[in-house]
Image: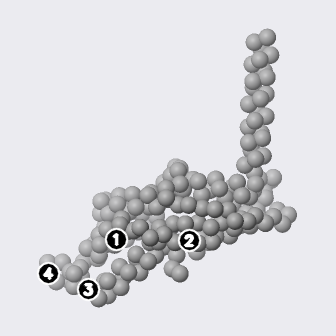
């Protein structure tokens, strides 16, 4: 009896995981899982964030950590709503509205401030010091409260029976990161 129960339990787990895979194998579910990876700060998202921070023009470890913390908060606060799914054979489009912190406005305002107040970012010798401006921008990004909504049409292709998200465009990445200039 215990063996039969064990076998049935194993079969049930197997069937449920098969059903789970089937339930997760829709274009909409793939987009939801992708965006939820940002909200939960999964390992892939954090690894990509580390790579981005290394490419940024940040001068010290404190600035790098500040930027990471800003983006982690940003990703956790990301909101989305699936608006539509269109499937045409092995191709699909999932229209999604996302709401993110409006960092684009912050960056634009900071650049305008720099243009009008460049001398505030000079070092003791009177020479412009970009590290001072970077710290100014990071402080402004930390204080960002305004949000903006964007529509993203995610493209998916069914390969070997599984829906796969296509690579994001630069515009889509900028929207997710709150840096899209509108």
10 Å neighbourhood of mark 4: few (<14), some, or many (≥20)? few
On screen, residue 24 versus residue 79, left or right, reads right
Query: From the image, which quarter does the N terminus lie in?
Result: top right
Identify the residue position indicated by label 1 in the image. 140
Q: Nearer the viewer, mark 2 or mark 3?
A: 2
Identify the residue position indicated by label 2 in the image. 149
Q: Which disc number belongs to residue 117?
A: 3
Residue 112 vs 174, above or below: the answer is: below
Identify the residue position indicated by label 4 in the image. 125
On the question of residue 119 being in view, the answer is yes
Residue 178 pos. (x, y %):
50, 70
Mark 4 → mark 2, Cα distance in angstroms? 44 Å
Mark 3 → mark 4, Cα distance in angstroms? 17 Å
Mark 1 → mark 4, Cα distance in angstroms? 25 Å
Mark 2 → mark 1, Cα distance in angstroms? 20 Å
Q: Residue visible at 70% across and 54% down?
A: 29
Is disc 1 placed on a helix, strand or loop?
Answer: helix
Q: Along the line of sight, which residue is nearer the eye, 65 or 28?
A: 28
| Circles 2 and 3: CB atoms closer than 8 Å | no
The residue furthest left is 124
Sooner in the amino-acid sequence: mark 3 or mark 1: 3
Q: Nearer the viewer, mark 2 or mark 1?
A: 2
Sooner in the amino-acid sequence: mark 2 or mark 3: 3
Q: How is the image coloured?
A: one colour
Q: Nearer the viewer, mark 4 or mark 2?
A: 2
| Quadrant of residue 169 within the rendered picture | bottom right
The residue furthest bottom is 116
Q: Nearer the viewer, mark 1 or mark 4?
A: 1
10 Å neighbourhood of mark 3: few (<14), some, or many (≥20)? few
Sooner in the amino-acid sequence: mark 4 or mark 2: 4
Sooner in the amino-acid sequence: mark 3 or mark 4: 3
């Amino acid at each position: 009896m215990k063996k039969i129960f064990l076998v049935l339990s194993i079969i049930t787990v197997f069937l449920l995981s098969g059903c789970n895979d089937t339930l997760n194998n829709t274009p909409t579910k793939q987009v939801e899982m992708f965006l939820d990876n940002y909200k939960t700060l999964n390992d892939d998202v954090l690894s990509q964030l580390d790579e981005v921070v290394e490419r940024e023009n940040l001068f010290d470890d404190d600035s790098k950590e500040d930027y990471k913390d800003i983006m982690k908060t940003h990703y956790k606060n990301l909101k989305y709503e699936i608006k539509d799914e269109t499937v045409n054979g092995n191709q699909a489009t999932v229209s999604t509205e996302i709401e993110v912190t409006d960092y684009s406005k912050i960056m634009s305002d900071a650049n305008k401030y720099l243009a009008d107040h460049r001398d505030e970012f000079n070092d003791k010798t009177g020479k412009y010091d970009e590290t001072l401006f970077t710290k100014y921008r990071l402080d402004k990004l930390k204080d960002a409260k305004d949000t903006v909504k964007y529509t993203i049409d995610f493209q998916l292709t069914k390969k070997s029976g599984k829906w796969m998200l296509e690579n994001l465009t630069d515009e889509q990445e900028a929207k997710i990161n709150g840096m899209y200039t509108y």
